[in-house]
Amino acid sequence: MGLPHQRLGVNIDHVATVRNARGGAYPDPLRAAKMAEEAGADGITAHLREDRRHISDADIEGLMEVLSVPLNFEMAATEEMQKIALRHKPHAVCIVPEKREERTTEGGLEVAREENRLAHFLAPLRDVGCRVSIFIAADRRQIEAAHRIGAEVIELHTGAYCDAIAERDLVTRDRELAALTEMAAFAHSLGLEVHAGHGLTYDSVSPIAALPEVRELNIGHFLIGESIFRGLTPAIHEMRRLMDEACAQKEDVA
């Protein structure tokens, strides 16, 4: 029997970034989400930030109405976002760190220092049926804390690994990949479902997709950027092809 299908979640935040640069309604992130779904995406990810710099409340409303695949709602651990998630009850919520001054999410959530607060924050989300994920660094202490507070899923931050590839820093690349490999196995041993994402490109995705414990990759900025040159559907098809090749290789090893 083969390994479970590795899911691809497509993040459509930066379609909204382009829309918001001019105002108005174009390009429409809902249209991008439906195109991604038709191209084979297993889910759609959208991050409703406190400052609404890309995805808007109306986008979340629309995504809940039009999608046939699951919505992964990325959110900070704030009372405002909790209320929005409890109203919409998306398939999944992913709790991420958030700072107004950052361009994009800079690192994983600090779970260990906020364990009690986060445990209480997550409980109502689980109670309404949302699958709860925590976006964290490949760090044993954070993974153990995520497990203790009742997260069902962790998403490992792949940003440092991807940056090292872009910078041709092979030492850092190998160190970060080793940490991701070890911590994916550790999280799986605790019964957590393992996802990964942030900064993944055609050049960096295969070693992460090849990790046997990784069930889902969430990829956004690169796919939206690549769609400028080749179109969204072909961009997703190529990412899916690379993921499938990597998964086929790990099945051969297994």
Image (cartoon, helix red, strand yellow):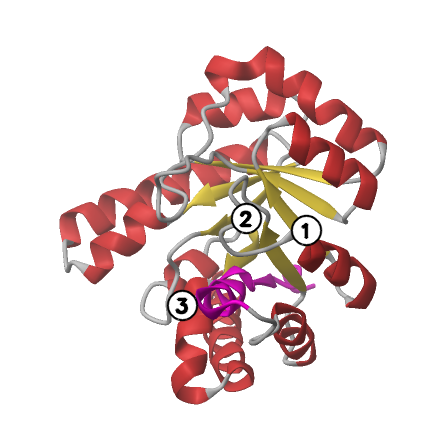
Q: Residues within 10 Å of mark 1 (few under 14, many from 20)?
A: few
Q: Amino acid at mark 2?
A: Arg
Viewer-proximal residue among 84 and 217: 84
Residue 52's disc number: 2
Q: Mark 2 vs mark 3: which is more N-terminal?
A: 2
Residue in the picture at 65% in, 70% down: 33
Q: Mark 2 vs mark 1: which is more N-terminal?
A: 2
State the image coordinates of residue 239 (x, y, percent, origin top left): 48, 74
Q: Amino acid at mark 1?
A: Asp
Left or right: where does residue 53 sit relative to residue 117? left
Left or right: where does residue 250 sit relative to residue 116? left
State the image coordinates of residue 254 (x, y, percent, origin top left): 53, 59
Report the span colored magenta: 1-23
Q: Callout 2: helix, strand or loop?
A: loop
Pick out the residue farthest to the front. Answer: 23
Residue 57's disc number: 1
Q: Do callouts 2 and 1 mark residues in contact (Cβ within 8 Å)? A: yes
- Location of the N terminus by quadrant is bottom right
Q: Amino acid at mark 3?
A: Phe
